[in-house]
Amino acid sequence: MYFTDRSLLPENQPPLIITAAPYGPIWAPSDLPGQVPVTWDEQVQAAVDCYNAGARILHIHVRDPKTGKISKNFDDYGRQIARLREAVPGMVLQVGGSISFSPEGDEAAHWQSYDTRHMLTELDPKPDQVTVAIGSTQYDLTSMLTMDDVEGTHMHDPKVIWQYSQMVADATPEFYIENLRRLRENGIQAYFALAHVHSLEIVERLIRQGLYAGPVNGFYSMVGGGAAGSNPFDLMELIRRAPHGSSFTYQSVFRMVYPISAMCIALGQHVRAGIEENLWGPVKGQRYTSVEMISKMVRFAEELGRPIATPEETRQILKLGTWYDSPEETLFNLGLPPNRNDGERGFLTYEGFRSFQEAGGTRTTPVETPANPLDIM
């Protein structure tokens, strides 16, 4: 994204979209008594409470009340989406594409198979979005935590830490090309789950090759261990490289959520909060609920004068229901330069047009005149 002189002023920034992640798929109900929603009513009430606190996207993992574990029964997902549509009609319903990666027995944590994840594209009723991992990467959730972070939970066990440290987010082209195709076929928006800036490069290549044509929304998992970590210079590079027409949320782990979110709110980006990735307030030893974490994000935004998005503004920013018909149209709407034709030289631009339709569905020829650095003077 390109920042101009007044880009940091709140009246020039998009309203803040907060994603709620209140279902905590890695936690057992006994880890956080009263905080992990288990019954159907509790899972619905968690959504209502997060919405009332200011969240506009709900990141969904469905827990089976009979077992207390994340469900892999997709009928459960459909029925829960129906309940949520009725309870929080203003929320964007986003299903977590990993489903669950909690280790079972002595095995290492791992993502579900491609065929299992593809089944999320056929949910009925359908969600608004499904997260789609792009590019396999080591996904060691433990690399930036201390044992204090998981005190009092089942993760306060070296064996469990080892199981999570071995995790790989498995997402090769075999998976994501087919998953994106099925999501479009079923009218569900892809929400790109990216680990680092090279994942974003893959998304751009998919667009340029005609394998994806639609809005680019997603989140960066800044959890370390193969993904981007907490270095603010990495954060700035992710923001700098994001296309103008895209919308990204930034997620971290445990108390790192707060400084990263504060920077993102100031820079016009979007944030996520909830027990899925954090148990604490900003101060060490201070336990927070998902609602308290969301309320903290609202407070950060209020201090900077940045409004919280309304449900209508959220859908407009995300361009829900919008699809494009070609690489050229997608690139134009993202503010990315057009594909290069053979023989074209120089940096390609669209000149004098405010819409892809006004440009006649084509792109202009590049300007090849060498730039004179003295012109700015």
Image (cartoon, rainbow, N blue to C red):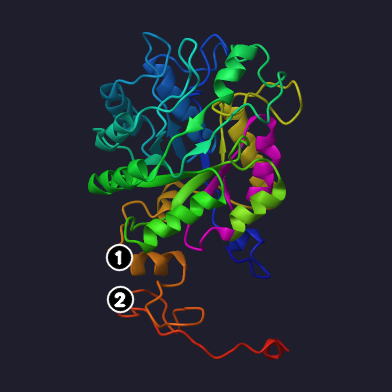
Task: Give the camera-side residue of 106 and 144.
Answer: 106
Instruction: Using the numbered discs, state the Cα–Cα distance from disc 1 to disc 2 in whole angstroms.
Output: 9 Å
Question: Is 72 one of the magenta-colored residues?
Answer: no
- Residue 224: quadrant of the picture: top right
At horizontal 51% and vertical 27% (from top left) the residue drawn is 22
Count numbered badges in the picture. Answer: 2
Crowd rating for badge 2 (residues with CA inside 10 Å; few <14, some 14–19, many 20+): few
Query: Marks 1 and 2: CB-CB under 8 Å?
Result: yes
Instruction: Give the percent coordinates (x, y) of residue 183.
Output: 29, 44
**Residue 357 in view of the camera:** yes
Q: Estimate the x, y position of residue 199 in percent, counting from the top left.
A: 50, 49
Q: Secondary structure at mark 1?
A: loop
In this view, the residue in front, 108 or 127, is: 108
Extent of the magenta region: 241-270
The amino acid marked with disc number 1 is Ser
Mark number, residue 117: none
The type of residue carrying mark 2 is Gly
* Residue that numbered label 2 is attached to: 361
